[in-house]
Image (cartoon, rainbow, N blue to C red):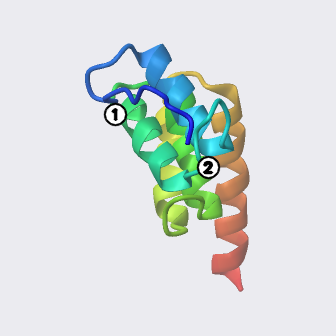
């Protein structure tokens, strides 16, 4: 096993938390790929109003990565990020809303 320092997502430098989340997500820098751990780290940042992390949480919920797929949760996260001006989250929210509207109309 490769030794690596684990950061506490609730009190570490947000940039370090983001890097650790990406390490878990992609299994890089000696980390084992672990989507559920990546979600924990991204959620800590999302709870601190990081729009990048909020958008990523939306993607996780939309695609069922590290969490149970939940389109309502995905939409909530996308909307939080979009409210802060995150352009990709805004596009995701609009696309997902269209898909949900089409599905509901059937």
Front: mark 1 or 2: 2
* Residue depicted at 46% across the width and 57% down the height: 73
Above or below residue 54? Residue 84 is above
* Residue depicted at 42% across the width and 17% down the height: 14
The reply to whether callout 1 and callout 2 are in contact (CB within 8 Å) is no
Above or below residue 81? Residue 38 is below
Q: What percent of the width, then of the height, locates residue 89?
A: 63, 36
Look at mark 1 in the image and give the residue it sits on: 47
Residue 91 visible within the image: yes
Look at mark 2 in the image and give the residue it sits on: 33
Element type at mark 2 = loop
Q: Badge 2: how crowded within 10 Å, few (<14), some, or many (20+)?
A: some
Of the 4 image quadrants, the one containing the N terminus is top right
Q: What percent of the width, then of the height, locates residue 34?
A: 55, 52
Above or below residue 3? Residue 70 is below
Q: What percent of the width, then of the height, locates residue 15?
A: 49, 15
* Residue depicted at 61% across the width and 49% down the height: 33
For this rendering, which residue is in front, 48 or 104? 48
Q: What percent of the width, then of the height, locates residue 74?
A: 53, 54
In the orientation shown, which residue stands out farthest toward the left? Answer: 11
Of the 4 image quadrants, the one containing the C terminus is bottom right
For this rendering, which residue is in front, 67 or 49? 67
Residue 51 visible within the image: no
Q: Badge 1: how crowded within 10 Å, few (<14), some, or many (20+)?
A: few
For this rendering, which residue is in front, 52 or 23? 23
Element type at mark 1 = loop
In the orientation shown, which residue stands out farthest toward the front? Answer: 1
In the orientation shown, which residue stands out farthest toward the bottom? Answer: 106
Mark 1 and mark 2: span between their CA atoms? 23 Å
């Amino acid at each position: 096993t490769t030794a690596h320092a684990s950061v506490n997502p609730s009190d570490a430098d947000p940039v370090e938390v983001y890097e650790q989340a990406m390490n878990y997500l992609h299994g890089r820098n000696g980390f084992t790929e672990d989507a559920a751990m990546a979600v924990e780290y991204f959620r800590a940042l999302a709870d601190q109003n990081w729009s990048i992390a909020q958008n990523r949480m939306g993607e996780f919920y939309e695609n069922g990565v590290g969490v149970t797929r939940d389109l309502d949760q995905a939409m909530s996260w996308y909307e939080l990020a979009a409210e802060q001006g995150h352009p990709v989250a805004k596009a995701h929210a609009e696309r997902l809303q269209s898909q949900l509207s089409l599905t509901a109309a059937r």
